[in-house]
Image (cartoon, rainbow, N blue to C red):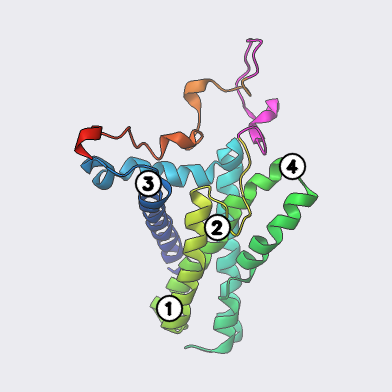
Amino acid sequence: MEFFLFLLFLTFFCLVTAVIVYYVKILFFSKKTNYRREELTDIRGDVFRICLDVLESGGNLVYGAGTFLASALFVWLWSLLGSVLGEKGPGPFEHIFHMPIFFLALFFSFPFLKDAYRGERYLALAKPALSGLALGNLASGAVHYGLDRDLFFLFYLLLVFLQIPVLVFLWNREPIFGVSFEESKSTYSFEAEEDWGAPSSTDSAPNNGWDEDEKGPFTDEEDDFGLGEDPFRDDFK
């Protein structure tokens, strides 16, 4: 029962975060000043592309999704230790084991890892790992708060406001405190390995094994989540 609720809340927070990311993108990070009604209401496809972009970080869906789920499950299992060591209801163990220590540790250590392992493709897994740790923490906290009231509401609210804004910048590919968690398209690419399923090409021009029309979502940042050109003429602005 708890595991089912955890997966349900994990999906819920993933979709909610994607919706927030989309609106923050078009309202704050986009250069547009006028929007069509469809751009503000019909967002299902863009929300799906945002979630898929997180899971296929580095160009490999299996590695990205596996890292995301493994990180989320690890945080959930870690939170269960608070229930084992503590008693029913809010207590010190519950709050200690729900603190986002692994999320914060990876977030603040990434600049040093980036300098030490620059160019390594496994650094691309930092995005799904951070996302899994954050959303897994929120999902497990929601389960424990909803079922047994093991957490104080203000403590859980603090977890939300601490981690969701970081994911908004991360999923929008914006620097956080001057640190960028994603490099260019050619860096950190898992699909550079031929034995990982990238289709072969006989063309002389290098294309990393993929056709131009098979690019993953958000590979072209100018697309702005599917936003078209400004529909209003200059004389209407």
Q: CA distance from mark 2 to mark 4?
A: 21 Å
Which is more N-terminal, label 1 or label 3? 3
Disc 3 designates what residue? 47
Q: Are marks 3 and 4 in contact (CB under 8 Å)?
A: no
- Amino acid carrying label 2: it is Gly
Which is more N-terminal, label 4 or label 1? 4
Disc 4 designates what residue? 120
Which is more N-terminal, label 2 or label 1? 2
Q: Are marks 3 and 1 in contact (CB under 8 Å)?
A: no
Let me know if residue 135 appears in the view.
no
Disc 1 designates what residue? 145
- Front tag of 3 and 1: 3
Q: CA distance from mark 3 to mark 4?
A: 29 Å
Q: Are marks 2 and 4 in contact (CB under 8 Å)?
A: no
Q: Residue furthest front?
A: 235
Disc 2 designates what residue? 132
Let me know if residue 170 appears in the view.
yes
| Residue at point 64%, 45% (across, down) | 124
Q: CA distance from mark 3 to mark 1?
A: 27 Å
